[in-house]
Amino acid sequence: MNNIKFSDTSALASAVQHQALSEWFVRKNIRAEFDYDAVDMGGYYDEAAEAIGRYYDLFKDILGKINWAYRNNHGGANFDLKKYSQKDAQTLNRLCREFYSHTLFSRYHYQKSDKLLNLKLQSATPVRQFFNGAWLEWYALGRLLQQAAQRGEQYAFSCARSVNIRFDNEDLHELDVVFLPVGREPIVVECKTGEYRRDLAKYLTLRKRLGIPETHFILLVTDVDEAQVKSLGSMYDLTFVTPQLLHEYLQRVM
């Protein structure tokens, strides 16, 4: 897929765009099921994910409270912005106002005198899933597409999100994000916003069964620092990155 502006378009959400990936899985004797709409860039999810990723260290407390409210069936959440610097409070307020304007919240109210932010949550399942972790998949996909766009119109690729795969022995797995530059090895990005340690053995086995090098099997993990990323990479035959490090890494591997 090339010669296209990837943001604000549904052009990626087609069987034709997924064809090269489909053929790669067939060659590996792996059955793959694609959700074409999972790479529909016509909505606001990719832009919101980019904003969360860019300001993650600042936004993660609010993100945590949003998910706590969802898990406990609360319709909304209040946030006291007085504990933040003026600049950070303004950034958080702006982000939440933008998310509201694009319907990620059903209500937004900021009490300026008390610096109190009130948000009413959307009950729609896709929005709940977005805040619960799908935002990181959209972030990874967006970063991959940014790199592809920088490489010009002749850079051909196939990409997918939320791919269900089945091996010959009927083992089932879901791949969060897969990106295949035509004629090269695919890049798999597994996105973890919560606990990831218990899944490391699973990911090691999955990478080997896919037959791709460790440089192309990326665990995108939040809430770890650069030192931890380096330590994990030296311990396991996998590549670990944070949202802040993903852009630089993709520049090298793509």
Image: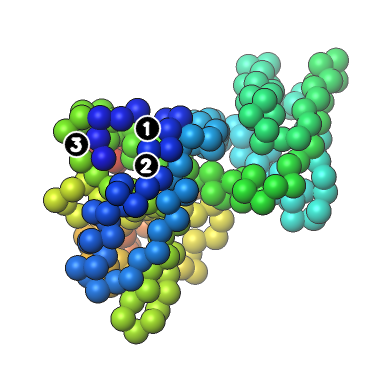
Is 209 drawn above or below residue 22 in the view shown? below
Judging by the rendered image, the residue that carries numbered circle 1 is 6
Left of 87 or right of it: where is 25? left
**Residue furthest out toward the left:** 183
Judging by the rendered image, the residue that carries numbered circle 3 is 155
Q: Residue at x 59, y 46 (%)?
A: 130
Identify the mark nearer the N-term, 3 or 2. Answer: 2
Kind of element beneath mark 3: loop
* Viewer-closest of 227 and 143: 143
Q: Amino acid at mark 3?
A: Tyr
Q: Measure the alpha-carbon separation of dots 2 and 1.
A: 8 Å
Judging by the rendered image, the residue that carries numbered circle 2 is 12
Left of 241 or right of it: where is 185? left
Q: Residues within 10 Å of mark 1 (few under 14, many from 20)?
A: many
Q: Residue at x 82, y 45 (%)?
A: 75
Q: Position of residue 178 (x, y in %)?
A: 34, 53
Q: Amino acid at mark 2?
A: Leu
Left of 119 or right of it: where is 21? left
Q: Are marks 2 and 1 in contact (CB under 8 Å)?
A: yes
Q: Position of residue 253 (x, y in %)?
A: 22, 44
Q: Residue at x 38, y 38 (%)?
A: 11
Query: Taking the image as drawn, is residue 193 in sight?
Result: yes
